[in-house]
């Protein structure tokens, strides 16, 4: 009976050590890889076994059971994680391997000119997105204005009446002083129009401007 209890205690101890070692690795592969990276960087030149042995020793010290032994399964599990992390850092050209020797090479440097180019590209893309967003907002306002104008015209049209002749879209409205003398010349092919306002101020409005003005004055409190 005493022998059976001893076997149970040994088994429980082994399972407990296994869980503690697995817990260290399970805290996150990212954190575990960072630990491996820091050890190689601090040593400059080391080996796979040296890094793995130190990590295993730290697990025992952290649990304050330095006299206990990590079972074979956990030992292999941790060493495999160290091996995988070193292979990743080698692929990223952060460390170099020569047989059993591992040498710290360092993180790849970023060219300052490249970073400046990225910043300029980011600023240009941000500006383009801003312009497109403003254009989209303006288009939405135009659609809303045309719909509002259609509803307004339907309300003003009396039942049974023929809708009056309106304006074809698009169009341009010329606004000038009521006392201004305006001279107009039109080419024979009707493609060119010349206006002369004789030094008096004037303004040009397209159909979108007019629709916006109509929407503006439809709101209570806005008077022309």
Image (cartoon, rainbow, N blue to C red):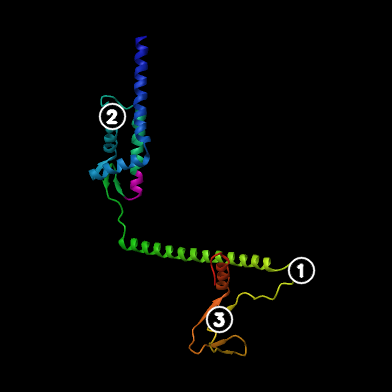
Question: What secondary structure is marked by label 1?
Answer: loop
Q: Earlier in the sequence, mark 1 or mark 2?
A: 2
Q: Which residue is mark 1?
A: 160
What is the number of the mark on residue 174? Answer: 3
- The front one of 78 and 166 is 166
Q: Earlier in the sequence, mark 1 or mark 3?
A: 1
Image point (30%, 41%), residue name: 36
Q: Earlier in the sequence, mark 2 or mark 3?
A: 2
Q: Nearer the viewer, mark 1 or mark 2?
A: 1
The C terminus - image quarter: bottom right
Q: Is residue 94 above or below residue 209?
A: above
> Where residue 181 sits: x, y (%)?
54, 89
Left or right for 121, reference 40: right
What is the number of the mark on residue 60? Answer: 2
> Where residue 196 sits: x, y (%)?
52, 89
Left or right for 133, reference 114: right
Q: Is residue 77 above or below residue 85?
A: above
Q: Are marks 1 and 3 in contact (CB under 8 Å)?
A: no
Span shown in magenta = 87-93
Label tally = 3
Real-space CA distance between mark 1 and mark 2, rounded to the nearest whole angstrom? 95 Å
What is the number of the mark on residue 30? Answer: none
């Amino acid at each position: 009976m005493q022998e059976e209890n001893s076997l149970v205690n040994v088994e429980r101890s082994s399972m407990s050590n296994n869980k503690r070692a697995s817990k260290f690795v399970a805290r996150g592969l990212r954190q575990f890889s960072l630990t491996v990276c820091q050890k190689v960087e601090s040593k400059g030149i080391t080996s796979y076994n040296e890094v793995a042995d130190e990590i295993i020793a730290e697990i025992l010290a952290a649990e304050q059971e330095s006299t206990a032994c990590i079972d074979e399964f956990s030992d292999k599990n941790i060493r495999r994680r160290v091996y995988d992390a070193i292979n990743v850092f080698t692929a990223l050209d952060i460390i170099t391997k020569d047989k059993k020797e591992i040498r710290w090479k360092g993180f790849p440097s970023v060219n300052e000119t490249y970073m400046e180019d990225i910043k300029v590209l980011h600023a240009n893309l941000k500006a383009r997105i801003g312009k497109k967003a403003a254009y989209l907002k303006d288009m939405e306002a135009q659609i809303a204005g045309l719909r509002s104008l259609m509803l307004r015209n339907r309300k003003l049209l009396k039942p049974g009446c023929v809708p009056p002749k309106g304006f074809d879209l698009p169009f341009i409205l010329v606004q000038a002083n009521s006392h201004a003398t305006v001279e107009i010349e039109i080419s024979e092919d009707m493609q060119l129009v010349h206006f002369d306002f004789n030094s008096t101020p004037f303004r040009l409005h397209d159909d979108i401007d007019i629709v916006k003005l109509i929407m503006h004055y439809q709101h209570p409190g806005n008077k022309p």
